Image: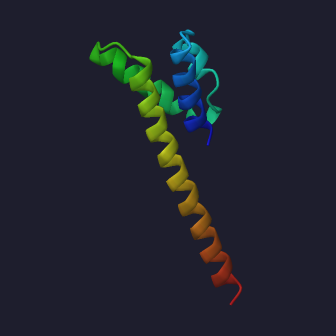
Amino acid sequence: MHFEYLADLHKQLVAMSKSVTDKDYTDTLPTSYNGAVSSISASVHLGSKALMAEISEQLILDESEWQQVKDRYTESRDKAQATDSGK
């Protein structure tokens, strides 16, 4: 999965004392996450709390998990509809 890979890569780079900016991190996200990233950024801005990479990473991983659940539900529903229409 893309997000787990990014999170692992980020940890490895930090362990090597390499700097990864938030922009570097978010630039690798699929466009389907633009809405989630915008919402996270707006929420943090309105809350006047600094958005740290760890917070951003966790929120994005949460969004990724939600997307996976949604995709599995859609696939399951599509299979059920195909089965019903085949009867």
Spot occupied by residue 13 in the image (x, y as percentages of width and height): 57, 18
Could you tell me residue 41's position as x and y percent? 43, 20
Dividing the image into 4 quarters, which one contains the C terminus?
bottom right
Task: Determine the residue positioned at 39% across, 25% down.
Answer: 55
Q: Is residue 37 above or below residue 62?
A: above
Depth order, front residue of 33/21: 21
How many numbered marks are there?
Answer: 0
Q: Quadrant of residue 80?
A: bottom right
In the rendered view, tell whether residue 67 sits above or below residue 25: below
76 versus 29 height, above or below:
below
Q: Quadrant of residue 76?
A: bottom right
At a point 56% along the width and 34% down the height, the residue shown is: 33
Percent coordinates x, y for residue 38 in the rendering: 48, 25
Q: Residue lying furthest right in this view?
A: 86
Q: Is residue 82 left or right of residue 56?
A: right
The residue most toward the front is: 16
Provide residue 58's location: percent of width, then percent of height. Answer: 42, 32
Please report the residue visible at 64 percent of the width from the left and 73 percent of the height from the top. Answer: 79
Q: Quadrant of the N terminus?
A: top right
